[in-house]
Amino acid sequence: MKFLKKIQDLPKETRKIIFWIIIVFIGVIFIVTWFYSIKTRLVKIEEINPFDQYKIPEIKMPEIKTPEIPDISEEEWNKMVEEEVQKESGSQQSAQ
């Protein structure tokens, strides 16, 4: 109690200075504690991979077999096209 009595007996300006020094000191302690807790939380978050928590189901894609395209020379191709054109023109004439 003698300590508080000594402070009360000091001039008002001195008491204000002591008050603000104590407030700043407590504020610094709070800020340091807050930064430390943020650091520990971030370390915990880094340890846990959020993508490991939620498993995405695998989709099994069917195997698609592509047909083999034979090698055809340009002459054979032109001949096949002409045959198809003749078939089409013959079917159109018979339809008319």
Image: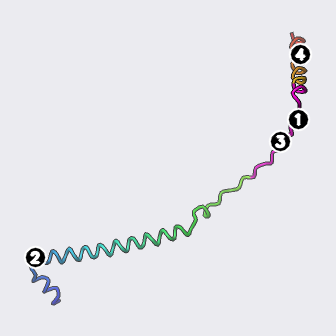
Which residue, given by chain and number where applicable, does mark 4 sit on?
A: 91
Q: Sequence order check: which comes first, mark 1 or mark 2?
A: 2
Residue type, mark 1 in image:
Asp
Quarter-of-image position of residue 69 = top right
Q: Give the distance between the C-alpha atoms of the residues marked 3 and 1, in whole angstroms.
A: 15 Å
Q: Quadrant of residue 22?
A: bottom left
Quadrant of the snapshot with the N terminus: bottom left
The three-letter amino acid code for the residue at tag 4 is: Ser
Residue behind mark 1: 71
Q: Crowding at label 2, few (<14), some or many (≥20) Cα neighbours within 10 Å? A: few
Q: Which residues are magenta?
A: 60-77
Q: Where does label 2 land, which residue?
A: 12
Residue 93 in the image: state x and y as whole percent. 88, 11
Q: Quadrant of the C terminus?
A: top right
Q: Residues within 10 Å of mark 1 (few under 14, many from 20)?
A: few
- Residue shown at 60%/64% (left/top)? 53
Main structural element of the magenta stretch: helix, strand or loop? loop
Please tell me whether mark 1 or mark 4 is closer to you in this view: 1
Cβ–Cβ below 8 Å for labels 3 and 1?
no
Cα–Cα gap, marks 1 and 4: 29 Å
- The Cα atoms of the two marked residues, 2 and 4, are separated by 114 Å
Label 4 Cα crowd, 10 Å radius (few <14 / some 14-19 / many 20+): few
Q: Splitting the image into 4 quarters, where does residue 87 fall? A: top right
Residue highlighted by disc 3: 66
Q: Is residue 1 above or below residue 14?
A: below
